Image (cartoon, rainbow, N blue to C red):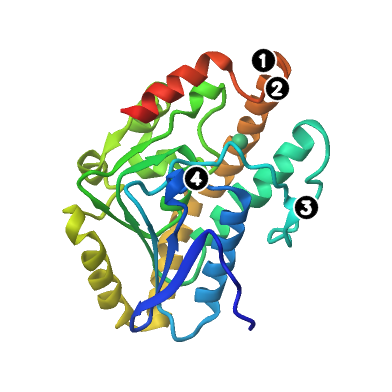
Amino acid sequence: MPEPTFERIRYDVPAERVARITLVRQETRNAQDYRMLHELDEAFQRATLDDDIRVIVLAADGPHFSSGHDLGNTATGADFEPRNMTGGYLQPGQAGGMANEEEFYLGMCWRWRNIPKPTIAQVQGKVIAGGLMLVWPCDLIVASEDASFADPTVALAVNGHEYHTHLWEVGARKAKEMLFRGHALTARECESLGMINHVVAREDLENFTLELAGEIAERPAFGLKLAKMSVNQGLEAQGQLNALHTAFALHQTGHANARAVFDGLPVDPSGIEVMRKLSKK
Ligand code: ZN
């Protein structure tokens, strides 16, 4: 396979059988444009197809893991080789909006969630809205003490970000409060809710994550695959994929309503100030 060239991420193998994918847009707090998501998908595929790799770490440069979707993104699915057989990226109105979000958000997150190898998110600083869509599809999450997690997108008159697994990540009541208030949950809170496996000091984050990845990478690849599939199938037996599709459809309704009502903008202007305040906390 030819070596892909990456602008938004870095791919390395920092330990035996461990691949690491690192977001390298720290000047934008690792905001995700479509190029970054496309590169992430290519990198995950590369690690998945490499039989010498058993565990994949997703990390980020800079003080913050990710500020979410890059609101300055001007690309569409038509600018990249499609990964999910969606099409229709240039259609007007919500038809195009939905097609692009199927391709880059729901489609890619679900692909990453189903990678047949353990994935570990290594998280520091703020994780906001779309940032959660990178962390939650991973199997394990290691966070530094300064990490915080928020989905303030109800301020935009939608139901939350597009990979709507909040219920499974923090439980139903906390999921509702997280969405209603848009406030940030601390790493320790998320650990107590079962969303995070380990909280460590910032200076120990990288080494702790690599040691954990290295330990898991010594175990048989096929056993790891079967263990992961068994837990994931349990989530699907609970209706996770069905619920995701329903939430995604409601999300598109929210966008369509906002476009129709708020001067043609895809956002509720009253929510912008709320979003700003929350992201500064
Ligand atoms: Zn959306």
Residue at the (75%, 32%) spot, across then down: 94
Query: Which tag, 3 or 4, sits closer to the chain's start?
Result: 4
Residue 52 is drawn in which quadrant?
Answer: bottom left
Q: Is mark 3 within 8 Å of ligand 1?
A: no
Query: Which tag, 4 or 1, sits closer to the chain's start?
Result: 4
- For this rendering, which residue is in front, 272 or 161? 272
SS under mark 4: loop
Query: Which tag, 3 or 2, sits closer to the chain's start?
Result: 3
- Please name the residue that numbered disc 1 is placed on: 262
Instruction: State the image coordinates of residue 77 (x, y, percent, origin top left).
Output: 73, 51
Mark 3 closeness class: few <14, some 14–19, many ≥20 residues within 10 Å: few
Instruction: State the image coordinates of residue 95 (x, y, percent, origin top left).
Output: 78, 36
Task: Assign the N terminus to one quadrant of the image.
Answer: bottom right
Q: Is residue 18 above or below residue 32?
A: below
Q: CA distance from mark 2 to mark 1?
A: 6 Å
- Label 4 or label 1, whichever lies nearer to me, is 4
Instruction: State the image coordinates of residue 175 (x, y, percent, origin top left).
Output: 38, 32
- Please name the residue that numbered disc 3 is placed on: 78
- Please name the residue that numbered disc 4 is placed on: 31
